[in-house]
Amino acid sequence: MDFIIFSFIILIAAILQTSTGFGFSILATPFLLLLFDVTDAIQINLILSLFISLVLISKIRNDIDMMILKRLIAGSITGLPAGIAVLWFADLNHLKIIVSILILSLTMLLILNFRISRTNGRDALFGGLSGAMTSSIGMPGPPLLLYFSGTSASKEKLRGTTLAFYLFIYSASLVLQIAVTGIQKIVWTSSAVALPVVIIGLFWGQLLFKRIDQRLFRLLTYGILLFTGGYLLWESLP
């Protein structure tokens, strides 16, 4: 039964990642925490997300905004070690409550048509926030998603730039995780078992991406954020 649940989580998350550019870690991590220890769940997410980014990068390279990407990476370099420190010292339950409230609050601002003017400094700031969330709880998506949605970026630029950034951020986070906490055999075996399911999800996600217009893409974005934030909050409260 756990294998079926695990496969279903990975399949849906891979479809969302391919069709939107952000869905895997946002959807997968909360549910993987129900099946694995915290560190194992985060590392499985990092490995599979890195695999997805590697597979997709050649398909979306023309949609990448290289200047924004460079600033995101520069900002993330400070955020990555901060996230490891949070994972090492903070109470995970409190951390999840804070993250869930942040996701829900910022999503409501976007639904109310709140917009963020993009600047070079904010590119680096949100890159740093994304880096910290990746190395701490394996979820880089919310800061970038909220930032790019607020700046009215096209779905192609959003998906291309975030996937390219993830290729760096997942690699760096996984290296830091292994260096600081090590990695268990179950992480490698579970990731290997999940790869065929991920490949199926990638195929379906590519088909879905071609059928999503900008309005539907935005609605899907808000729905995933609200669901994830609400689930994290509900699961974390006593």
Image: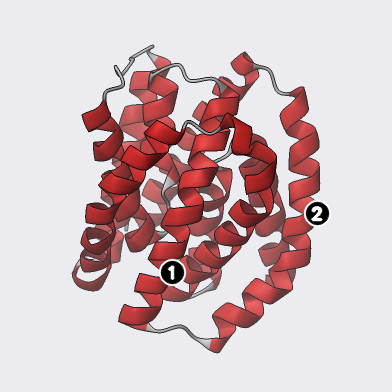
The residue under the point 67% across, 42% down is: 18
Do the residues under discs 1 and 2 have CB atoms within 8 angstroms?
no
Q: Amino acid at mark 2?
A: Ile
Q: Is residue 194 left or right of residue 184?
A: right
The residue under the point 72% across, 63% down is: 7
Q: Name the quadrant of the N terminus.
A: bottom right
Rendering coords of residue 211 (x, y %): 77, 24
Q: Is residue 192 left or right of residue 234?
A: right
Q: Where is mark 1, residue-wise?
A: 174
Rendering coords of residue 151 (x, y %): 39, 18
Q: Amino acid at mark 1?
A: Leu
The residue under the point 35% across, 72% down is: 176
Quarter residue 188 falls in = bottom right
Q: Where is mark 2, residue-wise?
A: 200
Above or below: residue 34 compared with residue 147: below
The residue under the point 56% across, 60% down is: 50
Q: Earlier in the sequence, mark 1 or mark 2?
A: 1
Above or below: residue 228 compared with residue 41: above
